[in-house]
Image: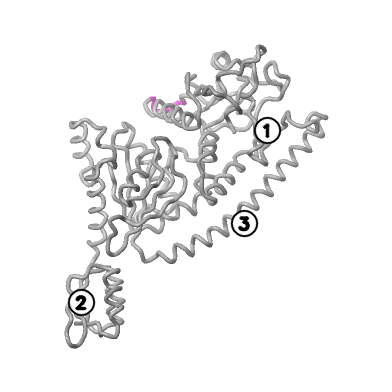
Amino acid sequence: MLVGRGMSAQKEAVIVGILLPGADPVAHEASLAEIEDLVTTLGYRPIARVTQARQSLSPAAVLGEGKLKELAALTGGSGRPHRSVGRKTGKASGWKSEANPSASEPAAESADDDGEEKSVALVAVDHDLSPSQARNLEHAVGVQVLDRTGVIIEIFHRHAKTREARLEVEMARLKYMAPRVRESPSGKERQAGRGAGEAAIELDRRRIRDRLAELRAELESLAREQSTRRAKRREARRVVLVGYTNAGKSSLMRGLTASSVHVEDRLFATLDTTVRALSPEARPRVLVSDTVGFIRDLPHDLVASFKSTLDEALEASLLLEVVDASDPGWQQKARVTREVLAELGAGAVPTRVVMNKIDRLPAEALAALQREQPEAWFVSARDPAGIDFVRSGIIRFFEERFVLGEFRVPYQSQALVREMHESGRVELERYEEDGVHVRLRADPEVVARFRSALPTA
């Protein structure tokens, strides 16, 4: 865990950002605001930012010497990146080797001489750091350091609920931690000399490799089970909700399916794919899936680990790209969503953009956005009228593909009439001497299937 045990007060965090040459200052500010939200989701209260314009991240400890001392003054650290023991504790700073991640206890739990715990327990850096940069910065500030990828992985680690999601997150977490394993202060064998410490590190690394092999085997088994379940519903019409984290996908899912899926105004509230039928139920049946939200610079190991979950998007009949219309940075976030979909191979799946949370927009801003995005569906997932609008749009999308077929169903095959009602829209059902005459509108492949089995009317 990242938060100390038995602590009643919320721990605080400091955000670090580097403005690199060519970076857009507005995008840089938005990125800092986003990592503050991520840190808040992780359970910390951001209290300060330390930013610096540099040509590159310092290879030693990210920041220049002056800014490093400014940061250390906030955390109570020494400001010196090269040292082997933590401030006033005599213990090595940093994460433990985490072949067993639950055994991790951060350096942030150390205390001052007066016995009071430090209020700042985390430094979150809005960049990806090398293991040496993270270690040196941690030495300088005296508290735990996480880069952007580390923060996201820890959020996933806390919020995953299903067995599959837990396995996927654990795999990504171990891959992230493997190059960061180093000597830990716990255990006498780790303090018995350099050779013993090196042996312990290698033991931890071997445990991580073994555990990764176990996870791959378990996930392959689960993937086969998922494939079987998907095959059973392959002919069903499938709508998949995708979009940036906290865009309102789960709220829309709840409204469209009348289900009790978890809804919370925070980043990555949903990590597990949920599949429910559209409600009121449509004929033919439509399945709706909610998926994990995307984010800028989503760690590649997480994208790879969640591939089986995100495969829902690949097999969708329709993607609903949910966008938070009230977010000033919605265009950049929509671009991130499309980039991730393209990376997954789902860029060609039919897509409709749903501009959500329009209840938070002034009338003038909403009108301007509607002129800018004339093809989008503008709704609030909190408004039943908005839910009805999206539901009608989904049904209209599928019915636009329908073709007409007229059939004569012999009385001994009346079960096919029931199947027609399940597979499309029956416009006429007339009982005559030679059988049931049915006029059906359905997908071309459905009509073709019935034509091969039945005489035409």
Quadrant of image for the N terminus: top right
Identity of the amino acid at label 1? Answer: Lys
Q: Which residue is drawn at 52% across and 33% down?
A: 151
Instruction: Specify the label residue 217 is tagged with.
Output: 3
Q: What stretch is highlighted in magenta?
A: 20-25
Q: Label 2 crowding class (10 Å Cα cut-off): few <14, some 14-19, many 20+?
A: many
Q: Magenta segment: does it hold 22?
A: yes
In this rendering, would 352 be left or right of 212? left
Q: Can residue 52 be seen in this view?
A: no
Tell whether label 1 touches label 3 (CB within 8 Å): no
**Which of marks 2 and 3 precedes in the sequence?**
3
Element carrying mark 1: loop
Which residue is denoted by mark 1 in the rendering?
96
Q: Which residue is drawn at 22% across and 57% down?
A: 396
In this rendering, would 306 be left or right of 204? left
Quadrant of image for the C terminus: bottom left
Instruction: Specify the label residue 438 is tagged with.
Output: 2
**Which of marks 2 and 1 precedes in the sequence?**
1
